[in-house]
Amino acid sequence: MNIQAPAQAPAPITPDDPSYIAALARGLAVIRAFGAGREKLTLADIAKTTDLPRATVRRSLLTLQALGYVASDGKHFMLTPAVLSLGYAYLSATPLPRAIQPTLEAVSEKTNESSSCAILDGAEIVYVARAATRRIMSVGLATGSRLPAYCSSLGRVLLAALPEAEAHHLLNAMKREKLTPQTITDVDALMKVIAQVRADDYALVDEELEIGLRSIAVPVRNASGQTVAAMNIGVQAGRVSREGLIKDILPVLKAAAESVAPALI
């Protein structure tokens, strides 16, 4: 039997490539301008956020409005529920969220803690599945939420799965703010932390993302052993110690991640 080799994905293009559609990129930038605390924006707000000319933003908004993705009250613009179809297309076409959701729910039921699964998207992690038991952060998290990769347990696991040079390049390129007194922002120091994560096969972040939050994450690998995502549990720092996370939570997470591997290609 002849088995064809999988087709190679086309190489990414740059903005100066003739195949690059600048208008599409600008329209997506306008959509990304909206978010938590930015539900209603004026044309000027969006132009400032995207660093695009007002005329360009106006054309993008009018096009998105004609397509049903944006609505307006005459002064402000806001996204419509139609935008959800863009995210749903990814969720419905990707087996990871469907495969891992029952596992997250089982983990949360067993530990009585919130658990999440995320993938890496540039400088950020994106939550693709979540089972919440209680609110532990000041900012609510849900599917589609984003957090910085450099200071989150999920992000560090995903950075550790990359070749060292690629992880170093990403860290250098991303904005690294000191979100708490404990946040590590130096690239060399972060590379040492990520090397330790790679060796330990888990990441523990202690109040670097937010004061009062402690979290532990493990890689989620597919049937071929490739890291395709990360799974974590977050706890209130005053209630669960670092030792408690490693002793009681880490084994549950590792077992859960291993159990879902056969379902992932």
Image: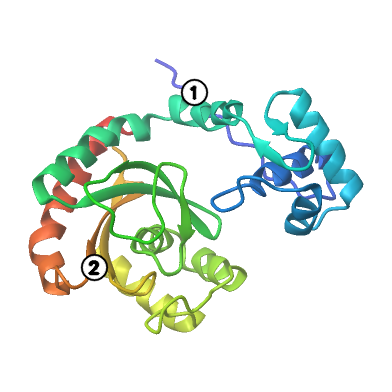
Query: How far separated are the C-alphas under marks 1 and 2?
Result: 37 Å
Counting from the top left corner in percent of width and height, residue 152 is at 38, 64
Q: Amino acid at mark 2?
A: Asp
> Which of the two marks, 1 or 2, is nearer to us in this view?
2
Label drawn at residue 127: none
List the residue tagged with mark 1.
4
Q: Quadrant of the C terminus?
A: top left
Query: Along the polypeptide, which appears first: circle 1 or circle 2?
Result: 1
Counting from the top left corner in percent of width and height, residue 119 is at 43, 48
Q: Compared to 247, does 109 lie above or below?
A: above
**150 left or right, relative to 24:** left
Helix, strand or loop under label 2:
helix
What is the tally of numbered marks visible in this picture? Answer: 2
Q: Amino acid at mark 1?
A: Gln
Tell me the residue at 54%/60% (across/down).
123
Residue 198 in view in this figure: yes
Q: Compared to 1, does 164 lie above or below?
A: below
**215 left or right, relative to 107:** right
Tell me the residue at 40%/84% (across/down).
181
Q: Compared to 263, does 42 lie above or below?
A: below
Q: Quadrant of the N terminus?
A: top left
Outermost residue, right side: 55
List the residue tagged with mark 2.
200
Counting from the top left corner in percent of width and height, residue 10 is at 66, 37
Helix, strand or loop under label 1:
loop
